[in-house]
């Protein structure tokens, strides 16, 4: 099995200057599509599940599916990550079910809707990091609240997202505060707020610096050059996918996502993990609509799912190539979680002194 922790994977990405897409899944078809793309490009991969996905698919089903994917694709380093954990229990049960990495999103309270205080975020994230590191699992924290700089609002994804109007300062991670947060929590990766948001409707126009603040990433990287940064809400919402959906009975209004070239710019400034969900959903949904329109008598789910898997595979492959992850899987020698636990215990993986590990 080639299960890898987020920390080891992102250390390798930092050493070799690439980023790793983190694709959300809910079912077998999505998992197979991601792994086929990873195999085709010889790329390591992060598969992540939200609380909504865990509720939809069931923890045992997800755990067995990840075991199966790791067995079918033994040469691909695979990190299984909990996306937007809302409390200690969510994170610890994920680890119990075989996740090698968890996100503790303390930017919101346990209801996953109410913005939290900085002190609350530090305290709960530090507790999760300490517990996860005991068994060698990695931890991602979040500082700042994910939301739109255009509207001042968050967008819920699987029940996770700030509600109501947000102060502009909450929507942009403060670089000085980021330094303190990483030092006090011991996180392995830091998700930052820079104007990205969940869902398809991120921007009303092609984003520029006033609504997509890539300068924040650059400022944080300058202060924390050895900390792995994470971009959430980073689907690009490709025009061609919008067109396929709308040409086959859909009614998506014109919208804009995060341009791939802006993500690549982020990778040059310390972004190592890039969350992508909406693009995968759109790729699959477009094929469902296309097949239903072309053959109204079709009722075999496989006739819908196979083309949808192919479309998602192609999208994932494009992102693995664009972010520089292609060709990196075979260069990584996976370290067991027990060994990672010993490294945390010895202080060798101090977050303030993160260094890349050679294969």
Image: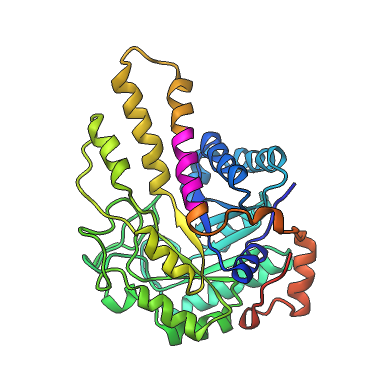
Residue at 58 percent across and 53 percent down: it is: 326
Quadrant in which the C terminus appears: bottom right
Asked if residue 42 lies left or right of residue 314, the reply is right
Asked if residue 77 lies left or right of residue 175, the reply is right
**Magenta highlight on residue 130:** no
What secondary structure do most residues of the magenta stretch adopt? Answer: helix
Q: List x then y, in percent, for residue 148.
A: 28, 65
The relative height of residue 118 versus residue 313 in the rendered view (above or below) is: below
Residue at 31 percent across and 69 percent down: it is: 212
Q: Quadrant of residue 215?
A: bottom left
Q: List x then y, in percent, for residue 286.
A: 34, 34
Residue at 64 percent across and 69 percent down: it is: 11
Choose between 274 and 330: the one closer to the eye. 330
Disc tally is: 0
Please provide the residue range marked out in magenta. 309-320
Q: List x then y, in percent, for residue 273.
A: 52, 62
Choose between 159 and 341: the one closer to the eye. 341
Q: Quadrant of residue 154?
A: bottom left
Asked if residue 78 lies left or right of residue 207, the reply is right
- Colour pattern: rainbow
């Amino acid at each position: 099995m080639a299960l890898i922790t987020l920390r080891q994977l992102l250390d390798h990405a930092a050493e070799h200057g690439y980023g790793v897409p983190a694709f959300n899944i809910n079912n077998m078809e999505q998992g197979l599509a991601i792994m086929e793309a990873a195999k085709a490009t010889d790329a390591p991969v992060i598969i992540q599940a939200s609380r909504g996905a865990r509720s939809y698919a069931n923890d045992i089903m997800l755990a067995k599916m990840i075991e199966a994917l790791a067995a079918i694709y033994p040469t691909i380093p695979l990190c299984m990550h909990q996306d937007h954990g809302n409390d200690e229990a969510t994170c610890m049960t994920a680890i119990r079910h075989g996740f090698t990495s968890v996100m503790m999103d303390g930017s919101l309270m346990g209801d996953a809707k109410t913005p939290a205080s900085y002190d609350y975020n530090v305290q709960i994230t530090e507790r999760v990091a300490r517990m996860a590191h005991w068994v060698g699992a990695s931890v991602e924290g979040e500082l700042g609240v994910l939301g739109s700089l255009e509207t001042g609002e968050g967008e819920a994804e699987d029940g996770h997202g700030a509600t109501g109007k947000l102060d502009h300062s909450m929507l942009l991670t403060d670089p000085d505060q980021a330094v303190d947060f990483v030092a006090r929590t011991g996180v392995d990766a830091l998700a930052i707020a820079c104007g990205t948001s969940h869902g398809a409707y991120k921007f009303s126009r092609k984003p520029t610096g006033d609504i997509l603040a890539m300068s924040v990433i650059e400022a944080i990287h300058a202060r924390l050059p050895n900390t792995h940064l994470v971009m959430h809400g980073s689907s690009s919402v490709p025009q061609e996918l919008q067109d396929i959906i709308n040409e086959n009975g859909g009614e998506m209004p014109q919208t804009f996502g995060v341009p791939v070239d802006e993500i690549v710019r982020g990778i040059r400034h310390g972004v190592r993990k890039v969350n992508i969900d909406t693009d995968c959903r759109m790729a699959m949904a477009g094929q469902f609509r296309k097949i239903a329109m072309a053959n109204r008598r079709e009722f075999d789910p496989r006739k819908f799912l196979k083309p949808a898997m192919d479309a998602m595979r192609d999208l994932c492959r494009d992102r693995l190539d664009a972010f520089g992850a292609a060709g990196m899987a075979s260069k990584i020698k996976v370290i067991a979680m027990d060994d990672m636990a010993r490294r945390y215990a010895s202080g060798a993986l101090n977050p303030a002194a993160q260094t890349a590990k050679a294969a």
